[in-house]
Image (cartoon, helix red, strand yellow):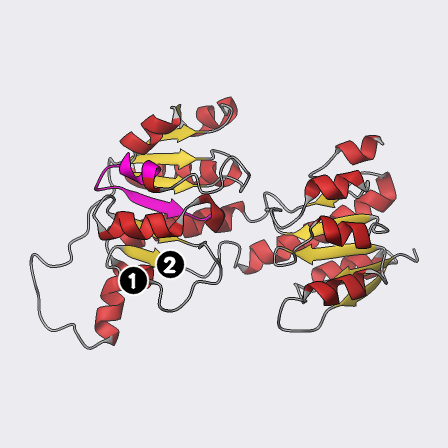
Amino acid sequence: MSKKILITRIIPPVAEELLQQAGFTVTVWPGDRAMTKDELIEHARKVDILLSLGSNKLDRAFFETCNHLEIVSQFAVGFDNIDVAAATDFKIPVCNTPDVLSEATADVAFGLMINVSRKMFYHHKLILKGEWKQFEPLKNLGFELTGKTLGIFGLGRIGSIMAQRCKGAYGMKVIYHNRNRNIEAEKETGAQYVDFDTLLHDSDILSVHSALTPETKGLFNKQAFAKMKNTAVFINTSRGGVHNEADLIEALQNNIIWGAGLDVTNPEPMQADNPLLNMPSVAVLPHIGSATIEARTGMARLAAENIISFYKTGKPITIVNAEVLKS
């Protein structure tokens, strides 16, 4: 196999090992930062295949310049950084890595929920500031999760695991809203399908697990938060663009909702002076949903196996734009 591959960042070595064993020539961008657009184009012109990260913006201009690429394999489950329509126009398959990070991301959503409900991040900061002085019976109280209602926006792989965790640990009632009903997940989790307004109105914890699409971009905004309980917690581990961050800040400052747990922000990275970071009932993480040894290794493996499968069988294991294979 004489095909050349560019991996745009250093990722777990299993990907490079598998690709080299399959006969590919692999080049890895060695920097500790994302490539600039010009750097990416310059290096992509020299290869046949791109194994990219979500930080790489692959827009129509990129594909117009690099339309020789035979396949793009994404080291991520999300692909909102890729103009899939443009890739499809140039008959370039686009792959992603679903499933392998579902457990890890659900763990982060579950952890954020617990942390926010008890203001754990905030209490930890009080210790660092030297403000842990004495027992104060009525100060900075949280709330218990047992018997609460969990609302899931996007009951797919990750959302289903989150639902199972919450139902098993706290006996929570689970409701959800999807574009289409997920009957199989309903059977597995006992989740009840509701319309979007009911999801907002009835959820004590509202956890977002959807893709970022034109339909979901900015969906959780001032109007949405106004329909939620003033005791509700908003959790987002999907993409920061799904919520309007200025509206979220306003909703928290004005006690429209009670708290928020974010593994994704809008924009990313979040600035250190963002008011969310100092709110008692808010917990923010730097997009670490997949940051486990198991998940990242699985992502690297699947990203490589997608490429290998494409050249062996004509079909990747997981593909976003399957229509290009028909042509």
Q: Is 175 above or below relative to 304?
A: above
Q: Say which element carries label 1.
A: helix
Q: Which residue is mark 1?
A: 121
Alpha carbons under labels 2 and 1: distance apart: 9 Å
Q: With 286 as the anchor, is 199 left or right in this view?
A: left
Q: x and y percent of residue 175 in the render?
A: 36, 29
Q: Is 80 above or below relative to 43?
A: above
Q: Is 115 above or below relative to 132?
A: above
The answer to whether the residue labelled 2 contacts the one labelled 1, judged by CB atoms less than 8 Å apart, is yes
Q: Say which element carries label 2.
A: strand
Q: Which residues are magenta?
A: 223-238
Q: With 241 as the anchor, is 47 left or right in this view?
A: right
**Residue 317: in sight, yes or no?**
no
Closer to viewer: mark 2 or mark 1: 2
Quadrant showing the C terminus: top right
Q: Is 89 above or below relative to 293?
A: above
| Mark 2 / mark 1, whichever is N-terminal | 1
Nearer to me, 219 or 9: 219
Q: x and y percent of residue 310 in the render?
A: 82, 43
Nearer to me, 125 or 190: 125
Nearer to me, 104 or 251: 251
Q: Which mark is residue 284?
A: 2
Q: Tell me where residue 141 sits by quadrant.
A: bottom left
Kind of residue sitting beneath label 2 = Val
Residue at 67% from the left image edge and 73% from the top image edge: 31
Kind of residue sitting beneath label 1 = Phe
Residue at 61% from the left image edge and 43% from the top image edge: 98
Q: Is residue 255 magenta?
A: no
Q: Which mark is residue 59?
A: none
Q: Tell me where residue 134 sits by quadrant.
A: bottom left
**Residue 168: in sight, yes or no?**
yes
Q: Callout 1 environment at 10 Å: few (<14), some (14 to 19), or many (20+)?
A: some
